[in-house]
Amino acid sequence: MSNILLSFAVSGRNDQYGHDFKRRFTQAMNMLAWSAARTGTLDKLEVVFADWNSHIPMAEELTLSQEATDIVRFIEIPPDIAAKYNDPISPFHQSVAFNAAMRRARGKFIGMMPADILFTSHALRNLLALLDNKVPVDFSITDAVWAVPRKNIPFIAQESHFFSSPQAIESLLLAGD
Protein backbone atom coordinates (compact mmCIF):
# COMPACT_ATOMS: atom_id res chain seq x y z
CA MET A 1 0.00 0.00 0.00
CA SER A 2 1.23 3.47 -0.87
CA ASN A 3 2.03 5.99 1.84
CA ILE A 4 1.55 8.84 -0.63
CA LEU A 5 -0.88 11.35 0.82
CA LEU A 6 -1.18 13.71 -2.15
CA SER A 7 -0.84 13.13 -5.86
CA PHE A 8 -0.74 16.09 -8.22
CA ALA A 9 -2.12 15.32 -11.68
CA VAL A 10 -0.41 17.52 -14.25
CA SER A 11 -0.56 17.53 -18.04
CA GLY A 12 1.32 19.14 -20.87
CA ARG A 13 3.30 18.52 -24.01
CA ASN A 14 6.76 19.22 -25.31
CA ASP A 15 6.12 22.52 -27.05
CA GLN A 16 6.52 26.21 -26.34
CA TYR A 17 3.04 26.73 -24.89
CA GLY A 18 2.89 29.91 -22.82
CA HIS A 19 6.55 30.72 -23.47
CA ASP A 20 9.15 28.13 -22.54
CA PHE A 21 6.90 25.50 -21.00
CA LYS A 22 9.83 23.17 -20.21
CA ARG A 23 11.60 25.86 -18.14
CA ARG A 24 8.44 26.71 -16.20
CA PHE A 25 7.64 23.04 -15.53
CA THR A 26 11.22 22.27 -14.46
CA GLN A 27 11.27 25.27 -12.14
CA ALA A 28 7.92 24.31 -10.58
CA MET A 29 8.90 20.67 -10.01
CA ASN A 30 12.30 21.58 -8.57
CA MET A 31 10.59 24.10 -6.26
CA LEU A 32 7.96 21.56 -5.18
CA ALA A 33 10.63 18.95 -4.44
CA TRP A 34 12.74 21.51 -2.56
CA SER A 35 9.72 22.52 -0.48
CA ALA A 36 8.90 18.87 0.24
CA ALA A 37 12.49 18.13 1.24
CA ARG A 38 12.56 21.21 3.45
CA THR A 39 9.39 20.09 5.25
CA GLY A 40 10.35 16.41 5.39
CA THR A 41 7.42 15.37 3.21
CA LEU A 42 9.05 14.02 0.05
CA ASP A 43 7.58 10.59 0.77
CA LYS A 44 4.07 12.04 1.12
CA LEU A 45 3.59 13.30 -2.43
CA GLU A 46 3.97 12.52 -6.08
CA VAL A 47 3.43 14.30 -9.38
CA VAL A 48 1.94 12.32 -12.24
CA PHE A 49 2.64 14.17 -15.49
CA ALA A 50 0.60 13.14 -18.55
CA ASP A 51 2.88 13.97 -21.48
CA TRP A 52 0.22 14.35 -24.14
CA ASN A 53 1.08 14.16 -27.84
CA SER A 54 4.78 15.02 -27.59
CA HIS A 55 6.92 13.95 -30.51
CA ILE A 56 9.93 14.00 -28.18
CA PRO A 57 8.97 12.97 -24.62
CA MET A 58 9.34 15.74 -22.04
CA ALA A 59 11.27 13.47 -19.68
CA GLU A 60 14.07 13.20 -22.24
CA GLU A 61 14.61 16.97 -22.38
CA LEU A 62 14.34 18.07 -18.76
CA THR A 63 16.97 18.47 -16.08
CA LEU A 64 15.14 17.97 -12.81
CA SER A 65 16.80 17.95 -9.41
CA GLN A 66 17.33 14.52 -7.87
CA GLU A 67 14.45 15.15 -5.44
CA ALA A 68 12.14 16.18 -8.29
CA THR A 69 13.17 13.12 -10.31
CA ASP A 70 12.16 10.99 -7.32
CA ILE A 71 8.62 12.42 -7.09
CA VAL A 72 7.67 13.03 -10.75
CA ARG A 73 6.36 10.16 -12.89
CA PHE A 74 5.85 10.69 -16.60
CA ILE A 75 3.00 8.98 -18.44
CA GLU A 76 3.66 9.23 -22.17
CA ILE A 77 0.70 9.42 -24.53
CA PRO A 78 2.40 9.46 -27.95
CA PRO A 79 0.95 11.22 -31.01
CA ASP A 80 -0.48 8.05 -32.58
CA ILE A 81 -2.60 7.39 -29.47
CA ALA A 82 -3.36 11.04 -28.65
CA ALA A 83 -4.68 11.62 -32.18
CA LYS A 84 -7.62 9.31 -31.44
CA TYR A 85 -8.81 11.66 -28.67
CA ASN A 86 -7.74 15.12 -29.85
CA ASP A 87 -10.24 17.67 -31.02
CA PRO A 88 -9.81 18.30 -34.77
CA ILE A 89 -8.62 21.87 -34.08
CA SER A 90 -6.22 21.13 -31.21
CA PRO A 91 -3.29 18.75 -30.64
CA PHE A 92 -3.94 18.81 -26.89
CA HIS A 93 -7.00 17.34 -25.18
CA GLN A 94 -6.59 18.65 -21.66
CA SER A 95 -9.45 16.71 -20.03
CA VAL A 96 -8.31 13.35 -21.33
CA ALA A 97 -4.69 14.13 -20.45
CA PHE A 98 -5.63 15.00 -16.86
CA ASN A 99 -7.74 11.85 -16.70
CA ALA A 100 -4.72 9.76 -17.76
CA ALA A 101 -2.69 11.27 -14.91
CA MET A 102 -5.43 10.93 -12.31
CA ARG A 103 -6.06 7.27 -13.12
CA ARG A 104 -2.42 6.50 -12.37
CA ALA A 105 -2.22 8.55 -9.17
CA ARG A 106 -1.49 6.61 -5.99
CA GLY A 107 -2.20 9.24 -3.35
CA LYS A 108 -5.04 9.25 -0.87
CA PHE A 109 -5.91 12.69 -2.29
CA ILE A 110 -5.54 13.84 -5.89
CA GLY A 111 -5.14 17.42 -6.99
CA MET A 112 -5.25 18.75 -10.54
CA MET A 113 -2.57 21.37 -11.00
CA PRO A 114 -1.22 23.52 -13.82
CA ALA A 115 2.36 22.62 -14.66
CA ASP A 116 3.95 25.86 -13.47
CA ILE A 117 2.56 26.31 -9.95
CA LEU A 118 5.14 27.29 -7.33
CA PHE A 119 4.58 25.94 -3.81
CA THR A 120 6.37 27.52 -0.89
CA SER A 121 7.44 25.13 1.84
CA HIS A 122 4.92 26.83 4.13
CA ALA A 123 2.00 26.29 1.76
CA LEU A 124 2.95 22.67 1.13
CA ARG A 125 3.43 21.93 4.84
CA ASN A 126 0.03 23.45 5.66
CA LEU A 127 -1.77 21.66 2.83
CA LEU A 128 -0.34 18.28 3.80
CA ALA A 129 -1.15 18.91 7.48
CA LEU A 130 -4.78 19.58 6.54
CA LEU A 131 -5.00 16.43 4.42
CA ASP A 132 -3.37 14.38 7.17
CA ASN A 133 -5.95 15.58 9.75
CA LYS A 134 -3.30 17.38 11.79
CA VAL A 135 -5.23 20.65 11.67
CA PRO A 136 -8.77 20.80 13.08
CA VAL A 137 -11.38 21.92 10.55
CA ASP A 138 -15.19 22.16 10.63
CA PHE A 139 -15.73 20.03 7.54
CA SER A 140 -14.90 16.56 6.32
CA ILE A 141 -11.56 16.58 4.52
CA THR A 142 -12.53 13.47 2.54
CA ASP A 143 -15.96 14.76 1.47
CA ALA A 144 -14.83 18.19 0.31
CA VAL A 145 -13.85 19.42 -3.12
CA TRP A 146 -11.25 22.14 -2.76
CA ALA A 147 -10.58 24.87 -5.26
CA VAL A 148 -7.38 26.73 -4.42
CA PRO A 149 -6.93 29.94 -6.40
CA ARG A 150 -3.57 30.83 -7.78
CA LYS A 151 -1.88 34.20 -7.85
CA ASN A 152 -0.05 35.63 -10.80
CA ILE A 153 3.50 36.73 -10.34
CA PRO A 154 4.07 40.23 -11.74
CA PHE A 155 5.94 40.26 -15.04
CA ILE A 156 8.84 42.19 -13.54
CA ALA A 157 9.50 39.30 -11.13
CA GLN A 158 10.13 36.95 -14.03
CA GLU A 159 13.67 38.24 -14.40
CA SER A 160 16.21 35.50 -13.85
CA HIS A 161 17.71 36.90 -10.63
CA PHE A 162 14.37 36.46 -8.81
CA PHE A 163 14.32 32.78 -9.81
CA SER A 164 17.93 31.80 -9.25
CA SER A 165 17.07 29.19 -6.60
CA PRO A 166 14.10 27.76 -4.70
CA GLN A 167 15.12 29.92 -1.72
CA ALA A 168 14.97 33.07 -3.85
CA ILE A 169 11.58 32.06 -5.26
CA GLU A 170 10.19 31.36 -1.81
CA SER A 171 11.46 34.72 -0.53
CA LEU A 172 9.77 36.49 -3.43
CA LEU A 173 6.48 34.63 -2.96
CA LEU A 174 6.41 35.16 0.79
CA ALA A 175 7.25 38.86 0.44
CA GLY A 176 4.19 39.37 -1.73
CA ASP A 177 1.78 37.28 0.34
Image (tube, helix red, strand yellow):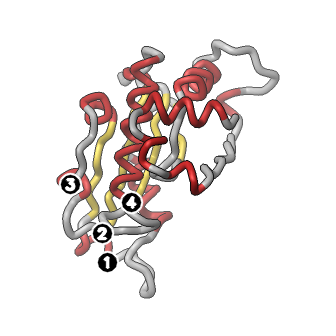
Q: For residue 53, which numbered disc appears in the image?
A: 2
> Of label 3 and label 4, which has the lower sequence position?
4
> Which mark is drawn over residue 21?
4
Query: Which mark lies nearer to you, 1 or 4?
Result: 4
- Residue type at mark 3: give it: Glu
Q: CA distance from mark 3 to mark 4?
A: 12 Å
Above-or-below relation of 141 to 85:
above
Q: Count neighbours of disc 1 (C-alpha within 10 A) and say few if under 14, some if 14 to 19, many if 20 or more.
A: some
Dot 3 corresponds to which residue? 61
Q: Earlier in the sequence, mark 1 or mark 2?
A: 2
Marks counted in the figure total 4
Q: Is residue 40 left or right of residue 60?
A: right
Going from N to C along the chain, the mark reached first, 2 or 4, is: 4
The residue pinned by badge 1 equals 83
Location of residue 72 by image quarter: top left
Marks 3 and 2: in contact by CB < 8 Å?
A: no
Amino acid type at mark 1: Ala
Question: 37 above or below 90?
Answer: above
Q: Earlier in the sequence, mark 2 or mark 3?
A: 2
Amino acid tagged 4: Phe
Q: Secondary structure at mark 4?
A: helix
Distance from label 1 to label 4 (Cα)? 21 Å
Element under label 1? Answer: loop
Q: Of marks 3 and 1, which one's residue comes earlier in the chain?
A: 3
Viewer-proximal residue among 125 and 111: 125
Asked if the residue under mark 2 is in contact with the one under mark 1, i.e. CB atoms within 8 Å, the reply is yes
Whether residue 3 is visible: no
Q: Label 2 amino acid?
A: Asn
Spatial distance from mark 1 to mark 2, Cα to Cα? 8 Å
